[in-house]
Image: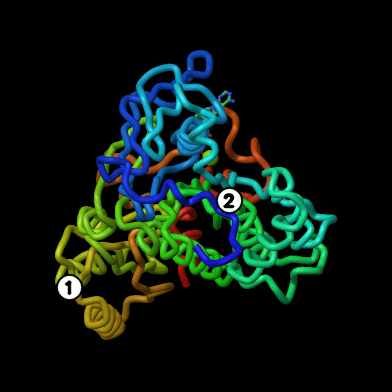
Amino acid sequence: MGEGSVGNDGHRGGYGDGYAVRAEGLEKRYGEKRALDGFDLAVREGTVHGLLGPNGAGKTTAVRILSTLIKLDGGRATVAGLDVARDPREVRARIGLTGQYAAVDEVLTGRQNLEMFGRLFHLGGRRAKLRATELLEQFDLTDAADKGVGKYSGGMRRRLDLAASMILAPAVLFLDEPTTGLDPRSRGEVWESVRALVASGTTVLLTTQYLEEADKLASQITVIDQGRAIADDTPDGLKNLVGGDRIEVVVAERSDIPRVVKVIARVSDGEPEADEEELRVHAPVTDRVSALTEVARTLQDDGVQVEDIGLRRPSLDDVFLRLTGHRTEPAGDGRSGGGKSGDGKSAASAKSASSAESAEKEAVV
Ligand SMILES: Nc1ncnc2c1ncn2[C@@H]1O[C@H](COP(=O)(O)OP(=O)(O)OP(=O)(O)O)[C@@H](O)[C@H]1O
Ligand SMILES: [Mg+2]
C-alpha cells in the first residue's frame, strides 16, 4: 500500500489453505423457499472469482451471508480465514461490499460521499479526506470529484460505489452485479477498475448474469442455479462446454429452414439447432470468419432470403442449456418481471431466451 493510505490490508496474504473464501453446504431458507440449498464455493486468494447465475439463483443471498449481513441456516463459511458465523465482526473488518443497487448519495459530490464513508469507518477527518483523494485518483474520478453525484453517468456512479467499498482496502471485496444496467462503455470502465483492485492485492467475488463479464474478469467461475453450484470451472472450460462461438442465421421464410440447417451443418462442429418460431438456425463454429463467409455465400447463391446472419458469443443461457438441459427461467416467485426496480434486469431476463441472448450480444459489442 502507498504512503499515507489508511487501509487494513495487513491481513492480505496467507489464510493457510490459499482460499480467501470457502463455503460448504450453505443453506438459507425464506419460508418454504430454499434460497441456498447446499451451496459450495472456494475462491482462491488474489483472484477474481465469478458467481454466474440467472435471476433468483441465490447470488445475492450467498454474498449477503459471506459478508455477514444475514445469518446462514446451515453449512459453514470462512472469509479471509475467519468463520462468518463465529467471527462476524472480524470478517466485517476485512471485507468490502458493493451491493446490487448503488449506495452513494446523489446530492453529495463524489468527494463528499467518500469522505462520509471514511468517517463512517472512523477514519477521522484528515485521514478520511486523504483516503477520498487517493480513491478518486485510483478510480479516475478526480475531474468529477466536486460535482454532485446526480450528474454522474452510470459508469461513474458505479466506480464511486466501488471506491466507497474500498475505503479500508479490504482483503476480500464482494461485488454484486457491478455492471448490470450499464452501457458497454461504462461496463468497460468498471472492468478496468476491478482489474486494478485485484492487481493491488484484493480478492474479488463478483456475481453476474453475463458469461462475457465472468469470462473477461474471472479466472474461475461457479455457476449457481436454485441455490446450488452446478459447475465450477475456468472460463475456457465453460466455453468449451457450450461449444464456443456460434453462427446464427435468421431467414424470412420458414420453408428455407431445412436448407439453412444443411448449409450450416457443413461448417459447424456440432449439431445445428433450429428455432421454427423465430426462423432462426444456429450452431457452434470454431473457424468463425470462414464459416460466416461460407454460409453467407452459399445461401446467397441458393437464393435463400436471409434476414440476419452473424456470430454470437455463448451466453449464460447457452451454459444453462448444456448444464441443466433447460434454459434460464425467470425466478417465478413474483419478484421478477417488474418485481424489482432500478435496472430493468429482472424484466429483461423474464423475457424469452432469445431476447436474453440478444441483450447479452448488445452488452458485449
Ligand atoms: N428477503 C427475502 N425474502 C423472501 N425470499 C427471498 C428473500 N431474498 C431472496 N429471496 C428468494 O431467494 C431466492 C434467491 O434470491 P437472490 O436474491 O439471492 O437471487 P439472485 O441470484 O441474487 O437474483 P438476481 O439476479 O435477481 O439478483 C429467490 O427465489 C428470492 O425470491
Ligand atoms: Mg441478486
In the image, residue 73 sits, relative to residue 295, either above or below, namely: above
Ligand 2 neighbours mark 2 (CB distance < 8 Å): no
Mark 2 or mark 1, whichever is nearer to me: 2
Amino acid type, label 1: Val
* Left/right of residue 281 with respect to residue 4 in the rendered view: left
**For this view, does 100 lie left or right of residue 207?**
right
SS at badge 1: helix
- Find disc 2 in the rendering and name its residue: 168
Location of residue 253 in the rendering, given as x and y in whole percent from the top left corner: 38, 66
Residue 43 drawn above or below residue 27: below
The local secondary structure at tag 2 comes to: loop
Where is 79 relative to 216, above or below?
above
For marks 2 and 1, the one nearer the N-term is 2
Q: Is residue 330 visible?
A: no
Tag 2–tag 1 contact (CB < 8 Å): no
Residue 181 location (% of width, % of height)? 60, 56
What residue is shown with label 1?
267
Q: What amino acid type is highlighted by mark number 2?
A: Leu
**Which residue, as the protein is rendered here, is positioned at the far right?**
107
Say which of 198 and 130 sits in front: 130
Measured Cα–Cα span from mark 2 to mark 1: 53 Å
Q: Which residue is at 51% across, 43% downward?
A: 95
